[in-house]
Amino acid sequence: MEPRYRTPRDLVEALQNTAAGARAQLWDWVREPVARLLDRLIARHQLRHGRERMVLHTLHALETHLRTRPVREFADMNTAAFRASLLIQVAKLLYNPFGQQAGMGAGPLPLPDSAGYISETVSLPFDRVGPCWYGGDWFAGRETRDGALWVIVADITGHGYYAYLLASALPGVWQRCWKRHPAGAEPAELLADMHDLLESCLPDGIYVECTLARFGSDGDVTVAPAGGSRLLLRRGGSNRLELLKLRGAWLGLSRPTTDEQRTWQLDAGDELLLGTDGVFDHLADLNGGNVADALDDLSRDAEARPLLEQVHERVRRALRAGPQKDDITMVLLRRREPGVDAVSTLPFPGPTARNGAGDVSL
């Protein structure tokens, strides 16, 4: 195919403007070497997922990556160097789960320290490839100068390795949109910006379900959904759980709006847990498929334990009773008591602590 865009800079700029022929040219340049890299991975690890779907997801992830990069990065690059850099990016994508290069094993990086909130996380991806675990869930956080902590929890359509291939682009999307995020903007507006970028990058039928929460230094928490968001709220000194449900449009399907977000007030000691579908589905498995019964069971727990510990223990119980069905991600925020040191905690082992039965050993 005669290239329409003569230089890498022209091609990246065309991709970012969704210009005609840009995607076809990118894929023409890299599809075959990408397929060969995946063939080696599939043969080595006996991956179950369809080859063509994995190639497609990798190509879409690569395009999304290029659409989050400054065009100036490619100004002095020739075509050979550009194609080589793309294959290096693909190799990193295929073999390095979230956080791997930062020495975190598998799973996203921890949330930032916050003066107002203690954060705790559990990440249990679905698929093991070699020594690492991969999944389509992802989370991240940012703290702003006014002391607010922003937390996003995302779940891409599907689970395991083939979902990870697309989810791997989410950190770049988040960072690019955050940089363009004006002071005073609402969480739903940031999600809408992410939707605008992802809408033309995702394969047909693939969407991103997100919960984006802004935890204010005064205890106000504003939550914007993309898809169906479920959160667990427990007030300090109480065992009773509240299930908070929000409904919005999936990223890639329709633009989120501020009408869909909601605000609550957290007092010192209050806990709010953000979880992906895998959390609630596995909780329901212990109670005949009924999430409400699972939450009633948690509320009756006589032991005064942190909320994340209680939920995690029941998820582990579900995994002992049957196979894991989805990626599982939990992010817990607890409003600090006055005078508590600002140290984020990660009390549970990450997915590298799994044993052969798919459980997690404490």
Image (cartoon, helix red, strand yellow):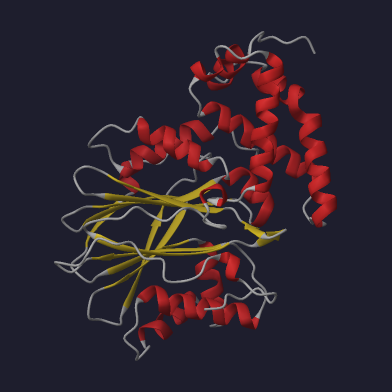
Residue ranking furthest to the bottom: 302
Lateral position of residue 306 relative to residue 252, left or right: left
* Quadrant housing residue 83: top right
Lateral position of residue 235 relative to residue 158, left or right: left
Between 267 and 9, the one lying in front of the other is: 9
Residue at point 63%, 54% (across, down): 158
Q: Position of residue 131 (x, y in %)?
A: 68, 60
Residue at point 68%, 44% (across, down): 94
The N terminus sits in image quarter: top right
Residue ranking furthest to the front: 103
Q: Position of residue 48 (x, y in %)?
A: 79, 57
As displayed, is residue 305 above or below residue 2? below
* Quadrant housing residue 110: bottom left
As displayed, is residue 210 above or below residue 145? below
Between 264 and 170, the one lying in front of the other is: 170
As displayed, is residue 271 above or below residue 296? above
Residue at point 65%, 27% (across, down): 85
Lateral position of residue 321 relative to residue 194, left or right: right
User: Is residue 291 among what the camera can see?
Assistant: yes
User: Is residue 205 among what the camera can see?
Assistant: no
Q: Position of residue 294 (x, y in %)?
A: 46, 80
Number of numbered discs: 0
Residue at point 38%, 88% (across, down): 301
Q: Position of residue 228 (x, y in %)?
A: 46, 56
Lateral position of residue 171 relative to residue 158, left or right: left
